[in-house]
Amino acid sequence: MGRPKKKEIEFEEALARLEQVAQEMERGQLPLEKLLARFSEGVDLIRVCREKLNQAEKEMEELSSLF
């Protein structure tokens, strides 16, 4: 899987992939280049998750303000 684009991946999918990446890295069996690639992918996935959570929080605040 390549680097995710924030609009192309759902939160749950990004979170599941992030868990996979973390497990692969924790095993300690990846060569340095692949480890760095997984780390970079993980950073991108964290960014995606954070943006989606922030968006959801904003929508909830907007909906709450209607009451």
Image (cartoon, grey):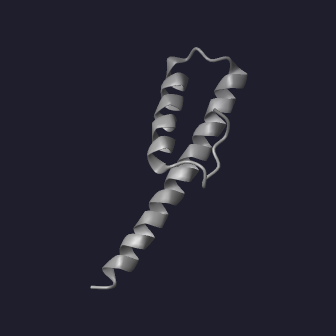
Residue 8 screen position, x and y as percent: 60, 50
| Front-lying residue, 22 or 14 | 14
| Front-lying residue, 13 or 47 | 13
Residue 67 screen position, x and y as percent: 27, 85
- The image shows residue 22, relative to residue 61, as above or below, that is above
| Front-lying residue, 21 or 63 | 63
Residue 26 screen position, x and y as percent: 50, 23
> Residue reaching furthest top?
29
- The image shows residue 39, relative to residue 6, as above or below, that is above
- The image shows residue 66, relative to residue 46, as above or below, that is below
Quarter of the image for residue 60 reads: bottom left
> Residue reaching furthest right?
33
Q: Residue at x 55, y 17 (%)?
A: 28
Count the marks.
0
- The image shows residue 6, relative to residue 31, as above or below, that is below
Q: Residue at x 62, y 45 (%)?
A: 44
Quarter of the image for residue 39 reads: top right
Q: Residue at x 54, y 47 (%)?
A: 46
Q: Residue at x 57, y 51 (%)?
A: 47
Q: Is residue 58 left or right of residue 21?
A: left
Q: Is residue 40 left or right of residue 19?
A: right
Identify the image quadrant of the N terminus.
top right
> Residue reaching furthest bottom?
66
Residue 6 screen position, x and y as percent: 61, 53
